[in-house]
Amino acid sequence: MFRTLFFFFLIFLTAFGVVWFSNNPGEIIIRWQDYLIETSFFITGLVLILFCIALIALYRFWWGIRNLPNYITGKWYQKRNRRGYKLLTESMVAIGTGEYEEVEENAKKIGSLLNSPSLTMLLLAQAAQLKGDEKSAMVYFNAMLSNKDTSFLAIRGLIGQALKANKLDQAKDLALKATKLKPKARWTLNLLFNIQARQGDWDEA
């Protein structure tokens, strides 16, 4: 909106200037050594305006050439991100349908495209669980513990494994760690209560 108003203002200002100079003609005489230049004030103003326009166009051209590498790099990253998120969406669907082979195939590609090794670990852990390879899943979850962005998800995965193996003490310790990371998470609080109830630890529950 502002640009449109500014554009119309410039048109109005230019038209006003042309009319004013037409109604108020004048002459400019320039003497330099043996040279004599005579012209009207209107022509001089027009030449100056065209010169300014040429300077602006030249500057914009120079600015475009200078920023061309950044523009190309930005487009390249956008393309990579789009491809990465497309593969991530497909992998989420594959996890839901139990197609672990597709998840494994996409995992490393996604990590590379989105520059997220932790995301690769998470997908590989999910794929390992889908095919029943709990040992490999544990390796991936443990690798995720060192990253604060994925540590909660890693603990949640390890808790699931501990509960499957009926290792309630281990699951309880992990649940306490998860509670420290996210004190307001209802899932961890409910889980901790259920574990303590299963152990008959009603005082803590």
Image (tube, rainbow, N blue to C red):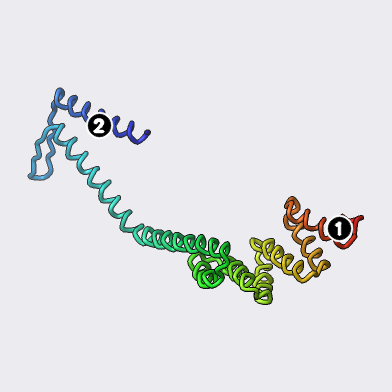
- The disc at residue 47 is none
Q: Which residue is mark 1?
A: 197
Looking at the rendered structure, the secondary structure element under dot 2 is helix
Q: Earlier in the sequence, mark 1 or mark 2?
A: 2
Q: From what the image shows, is residue 27 above or below residue 63?
A: above
- In terms of image quadrants, where is residue 189? bottom right
* Badge 1 amino acid: Ala
Q: What residue sits 78% from the left and 54% below the top?
A: 190
- In terms of image quadrants, where is residue 152? bottom right
* Badge 2 amino acid: Ile
- Residue 87's x, y, as percent? 48, 64
- Residue 79's x, y, as percent? 41, 61
Q: What residue sits 7% from the left and 45% below the top?
A: 34
Quadrant for the N terminus in the image: top left
Q: Residues within 10 Å of mark 1 (few under 14, many from 20)?
A: some
**CA separation, marks 1 and 2?**
79 Å
Left or right of residue 80, residue 35 in this image: left
Q: From what the image shows, is residue 149 above or below residue 161?
A: above
Quadrant for the C terminus in the image: bottom right
- The disc at residue 11 is 2
- In terms of image quadrants, where is residue 42? top left
Q: What residue sits 30% from the left and 50% below the top?
A: 60
Task: Decide which of 172, 80 is in the foreground and name it.
Answer: 172
Looking at the rendered structure, the secondary structure element under dot 1 is helix
Marks counted in the figure total: 2
Task: Decide which of 34, 97 is in the foreground and name it.
Answer: 97
Point out the residue furthest to the right here.
203
Point out the residue furthest to the front here.
97
- Residue 70's x, y, as percent? 39, 60
Q: What residue sits 75% from the left and 68% below the top?
A: 164
Left or right of residue 199, residue 62 in this image: left
Q: Residues within 10 Å of mark 2 (few under 14, many from 20)?
A: few
